[in-house]
Image (cartoon, coloured by chain):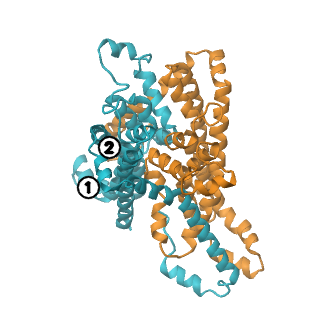
Chain colours: A orange, B cyan
Amino acid sequence: MSFRQPSILPGFGLTLGFSTFFLSAIVLVPLAALVMKTATMGWSDFWRVATDARALASYRLSFGASMLAATLNSVFGFIIAWTLVRYEFPGRKLIDSLIDMPFALPTAVSGIALTAVFAENGWIGQYLAPLGIKVAYTWIGVVVALTLIGLPFVVRSVQPAIAEVQRDLEDAAETLGAGRFTIFRRIVLPTVFPALATGFTLAFARAVGEYGSVIFIAGNLPMRTEITPLLIVIKLEQFDYKGAAALGFIMLTMSFVMLLSINLLQAWSRRRMVAAGR
Amino acid sequence: MAGGPSKEMLAEIASRPGRDTLISSAVKYVFIALSLGFLAALLFAPLATVFITALSKGWEMYFESFKDEDTLAAIKLTLTVAAIVVPTNTIFGIAAAWAIAKFEFRGKSFLITLIDLPIAVSPVISGLVYVLLFGAQGWFGLWLQERDISIIFAVPGIVLATMFVTFPYVARELIPLMQQLGNDEEEAAITLGAGGLMTFFHVTLPKIRWGLVYGVILCNARAMGEFGAVSVVSGHVRGLTTTMPLHVEILYNEYNFVGAFAVASLLTVLAVLTLIIKSLVEMKRK
């Protein structure tokens, strides 16, 4: 097979040339600089920086909180998507369009606003404080911020899948005596699961790298409420470029793994749609 | 958007026997309550807080916040950065979409993955890579210093980092759209003797214009609101290298809450406008 199939349309060389050039200049060369910087460190230096106690604590928080947030999003994202697809209620359209708000809202804004709401004297924080639950400036705050950021990913992935669930199958199952839970487990979940897994991974990937909304609500105490992206920024501020590059390299590798899993999940999701004849 | 049920579908569901049991309506209300409660705590309350705090000392103080020189400088810088980044990424997006959607070539899906890469990368890393390239100890640091050119802790760095972060938005909106529309009409135009540009402007552009509008406004919203990447390369020089989101941080850390939330309210309005345009575009598409 030749490099490209013949076509009478013009502009292939120009557009492909321009876009690969621009892609290289803006994205690939800078990312290569990060990899090269890490490579100049030597293995033992890299290992020392990457497994430093403070770094380990930051991974634990970043990945743990992201995992928790993505799980919360999967549960509530499914409930919200189901509500929006299946039920009619006043304001449904408005709420549907507001779901994208965390995409459009600058992260610094969601950060300071969430902090204000969940601080001890905030609208919600004041009711949680007497129960002994502190949200702002603790790891719970990190989870709250990451949950807000990831929500649209799950809802938007799951919505089309719920619309695909065949109502007649649900009805048939019901007439055959299946209970609600059985219908959910045997009919709804198998159709929706690939989309839910995609949404979970997208939300998780976004949460791991998130910076703006977290730093306001986290309190940023070393070893306790310090996320990995913040640790990179701190290392940069101390002109520890190598240390920053090493942590950046670890996060970049994680992003690649996540991107790959998302592509595989989406392919799986599509195959299931095709297999089901839809 | 996935959209909701059509009127007919809802009517049909409502008419089904056995649907409207006590339990099914209980489930319905529990689901609606859970959804609204979750969104109220996480989304509506923070959005309301932005405006209420911004206006907590009255409209006069609110408008006073925008008379501050540094705030005005931040607004101006944000607009300047967006004015450079958005058109550049739009041209890239159109070029990439043309190459990818109109032609079959090897390595295409790999190219698409690479274009999507900035979305998967942490914003902090988007800034970090430029510091490693152009910063004082970066690959080109010395070379730039000798020539007295500053990129990091200056406006060029902010532009580059923003460009990195918003890089895929137009392209990833146009690629699936143009793939779905196919090549037939373009091929007909070329066969009839139209040139490449004429074909693009008269045949392709009218078909993709709403997708293009959507990609551009998303790119713009992200460009104006980017925090992490810009924060890393900006150096936070008040009035010089602070964009609006960075200025929000500065005011907030100085406990100037009215000022911080006033600037934040502008950014929130921008987000709301973005969503409104998005809804309009989706209506046009249908």
* Mark before the other along the chain sequence, 1 or 2: 2
Q: Are marks 1 and 2 on the same chain?
A: yes
Where residue B286 sits, quadrant-wise, is: bottom left
Residue drawn at x 38%, y 59% as measured from the top left: B278
x%, y% of residue A140? 64, 47
Whether residue A203 appears in this view of the structure is: yes
Q: Is residue A185 above or below residue B66?
A: below
Looking at the picture, which amino acid does disc 2 mark? Val
At label 1, the amino acid type is: Ala
From what the image shows, is residue A262 above or below residue B145?
Answer: below
Chain letter of the residue beneath label 1 in the structure image = B
Image coordinates of residue B205 in percent, x first then y, are 28, 54
* Residue A144 circle label: none
Q: Is residue B112 left or right of residue B210?
A: right
Left or right: residue B206 versus residue A173 is left
Which residue is under mark 2?
B86
Q: Position of residue B71 (x, y in %)?
A: 31, 41
Q: Is residue A48 above or below residue B73?
A: above
Report how far apart the C-alphas of labels 1 and 2 lie in the structure: 30 Å
Task: Quickly name the residue at label 1.
Answer: B189
